[in-house]
Image (spheres, rainbow, N blue to C red):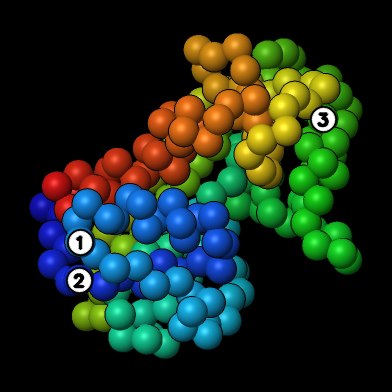
């Protein structure tokens, strides 16, 4: 039995303004006010785990310990079957450059490695999102969401972010980067984990 969220304020452990706005909209019907990590002057803890749940837990617990508020953290990435699940939790690392993140670089590397391995097409993959909701008393709830699809090359579309131009969700003809935010958010991995969170703790 999941714990119902009874508090009126939640800290979302992210410095990403877009993700924070998404969360605010999600929680609006439940009269829960959302505060972000930046607003609380929180640093970003080092993500040292090798799983999505492990890294989400690090972020959630660090935020709880720093503020005393219940905190929600997300860790997400893309798993490519032809690369044995890589980049997975290292998705953002593949995009790191001295001048910030460059996901075109990450997508090009992914394509090159699939070709080097002579991976059979279609190149199946999935986006994963794991949410950890942590309370000050140590209790936590975990919700994992996924969306299955295939990788395309060359990449298509200008919308979205990250690997969206390379990812075509199952049953669709367009990549995430060719879809509007509303279309993508209705079927995304984060939408899946959010739905489970709402059903489990707010429904």
Image-quadrant location for residue 61:
bottom left
Callout 1 touching callout 2 (CB < 8 Å): yes
Taking the image as shown, residue 142 lies to the left or right of residue 39, namely: left
Q: Which residue is mark 1?
A: 31
Q: Nearer the viewer, mark 1 or mark 2?
A: 1
Question: For the residue labelled by badge 2, is the local secondary structure a helix, a strand or a loop?
Answer: loop
Label count reads 3
Q: Mark 3 to mark 1: distance in Å? A: 44 Å
| Earlier sequence position, callout 3 versus callout 2 | 2
Q: Mark 1 to mark 2: distance in Å? A: 7 Å
Image-quadrant location for residue 126:
top right
Taking the image as shown, residue 47 lies to the left or right of residue 113, namely: left
Rendered image: mark on residue 111? 3
| Residue 26 x, y percent position in the rendering | 33, 50
Q: Nearer the viewer, mark 3 or mark 1?
A: 1
| Earlier sequence position, callout 3 versus callout 1 | 1
Q: Please tell me whether residue 133 is drawn above or below residue 62 in the rendered image.
A: above
Callout 3 touching callout 1 (CB < 8 Å): no
Seen at 20% across and 71% down, the residue is 8
Callout 3 touching callout 2 (CB < 8 Å): no
| Residue 172 x, y percent position in the rendering | 54, 14
Q: Mark 3 to mark 2: distance in Å? A: 45 Å
- Other residues around mark 1 within 10 Å, as few (<14) / some (14–19) / many (≥20): few
Rendered image: mark on residue 102? none
Taking the image as shown, residue 185 lies to the left or right of residue 197, namely: right
Rendered image: mark on residue 8? 2
| Earlier sequence position, callout 1 versus callout 2 | 2
Seen at 82% across and 30% down, the residue is 111
Image-quadrant location for residue 122:
top right
Relative depth, front residue between 114 and 202: 202
- Other residues around mark 2 within 10 Å, as few (<14) / some (14–19) / many (≥20): few
Q: Please tell me whether residue 87 is drawn above or below residue 177 in the rendered image.
A: below
């Amino acid at each position: 039995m999941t714990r119902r969220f009874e508090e009126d304020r939640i800290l979302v452990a992210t410095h990403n303004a877009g993700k924070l706005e998404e969360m605010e909209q999600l929680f609006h019907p439940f009269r829960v006010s959302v505060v972000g990590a930046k607003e609380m002057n929180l640093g970003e803890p080092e993500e040292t785990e090798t799983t999505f749940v492990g890294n989400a837990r690090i972020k959630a617990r660090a935020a709880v310990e720093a503020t005393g508020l219940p905190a929600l953290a997300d860790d997400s990435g893309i798993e490519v079957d032809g690369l044995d699940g890589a980049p997975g939790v290292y998705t953002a690392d593949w995009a790191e450059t001295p001048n910030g993140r460059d996901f075109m670089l990450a997508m090009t590397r992914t394509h090159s490695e699939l070709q080097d391995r002579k991976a059979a097409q279609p190149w199946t993959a999935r986006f994963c999102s794991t949410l950890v909701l942590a309370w000050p008393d140590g209790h936590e709830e975990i919700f994992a969401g996924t969306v299955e699809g295939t990788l395309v090359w060359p990449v298509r579309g200008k919308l979205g972010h990250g690997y969206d131009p390379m990812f075509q969700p199952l049953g669709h003809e367009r990549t995430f980067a060719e879809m509007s935010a509303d279309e993508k958010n209705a079927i995304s991995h984060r939408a899946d984990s959010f739905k489970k969170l709402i059903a489990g703790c707010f429904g």
